[in-house]
């Protein structure tokens, strides 16, 4: 059974959603990485005891950030060479290069392209305007619950889930009411 941590899976999922919404390949990779970082930070905050202080390294001057709305969340971002780059949780922007290292290279051999295709087929069932909403996270949350155990996801179960739900919104195990959130 091949498994993978949720972080790179969320990065690929968000990258494919960004492509469907209309971002360029390099912008989508940056946003996919940034979206995964955002949820990793949120998960870390939930696991940290409330009174515990985390020591921070001295901050370098970071690029000027703005906020963009993506996938139902507000992400800090900047522009680099005229393209959007995520700037979530640190001084350095999330870039296509950071996506390669932190997301793409984490997949077991053969699974990145297979899951990318499955995600793309499933997301094609939704109009781009519908995807630029909480739907991106809600669908992710649904498959991580059905295919995951702790922080790991069974990749074969995930592929099966995607194929079952690629028939169209509201078909398979996801009900129409639930998707309207």
Image (spheres, rainbow, N blue to C red):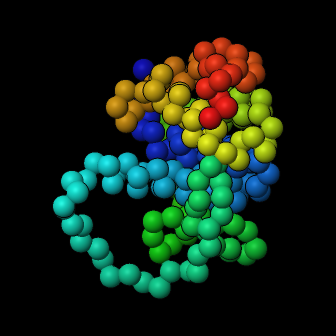
Task: Name the residue: 50% across, 72% down.
Answer: 92
Residue 122 point in image, percent of width and height: 71, 29
Examine the image and state in which quarter residue 115 appears.
top right
Is residue 5 in sight in this rendering? yes
Residue 131 point in image, percent of width and height: 71, 42
Quarter of the N terminus within the rendering: top left
Quarter of the C terminus within the rendering: top right
Q: Which residue lies furthest to the bottom in this view?
A: 61
Instruction: Reply above or below: 111 against 93.
Output: above
Judging depth in this view, the residue of 129 and 85 nearest the camera is 129
Task: Name the residue: 64% across, 38% down.
Answer: 135
Instruction: Reply above or below: 160 against 86.
Output: above
Residue 142 point in image, percent of width and height: 53, 28
Instruction: Reply above or below: 38 against 143.
Output: below
Instruction: Reply above or below: 10 against 93.
Output: above
Judging depth in this view, the residue of 171 and 17 nearest the camera is 171
Residue 174 point in image, percent of width and height: 62, 20
**Drawn side of residue 4 relative to residue 55, left or right:** right
**Drawn side of residue 53 relative to residue 73, left or right:** left
Task: Name the residue: 48% across, 22% down.
Answer: 146
Is residue 96 in sight in this rendering? no
Task: Name the residue: 79% across, 51% down.
Answer: 22
**Drawn side of residue 148 relative to residue 28, left or right:** left
Number of numbered discs visible in the structure rendering: 0
Judging depth in this view, the residue of 45 and 150 nearest the camera is 45
Examine the image and state in which quarter residue 60 appears.
bottom left
């Amino acid at each position: 059974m091949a498994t993978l941590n949720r972080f790179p899976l969320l990065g690929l999922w968000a990258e494919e959603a960004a492509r469907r919404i209309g971002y360029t390949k390099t912008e989508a990779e940056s946003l996919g990485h940034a979206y995964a970082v955002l949820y990793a930070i949120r998960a870390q905050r939930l696991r940290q005891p409330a009174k515990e202080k985390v020591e921070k390294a001295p901050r370098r001057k970071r690029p000027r950030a703005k906020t963009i709305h993506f996938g139902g969340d507000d992400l800090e971002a900047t522009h680099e060479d005229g393209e959007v780059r995520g700037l979530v949780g640190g001084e350095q922007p999330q870039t296509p290069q950071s996506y390669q290292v932190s997301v793409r290279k984490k997949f077991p051999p053969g699974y990145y392209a297979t899951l990318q295709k499955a995600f793309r087929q499933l997301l094609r069932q939704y109009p781009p305007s519908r995807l630029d909403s909480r739907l991106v996270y809600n669908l992710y949350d649904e498959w991580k619950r059905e295919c995951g155990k702790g922080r790991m996801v069974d990749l074969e179960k995930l592929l099966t889930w995607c194929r079952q739900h690629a028939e169209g919104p509201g078909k398979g195990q996801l009900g129409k009411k639930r998707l309207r959130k």
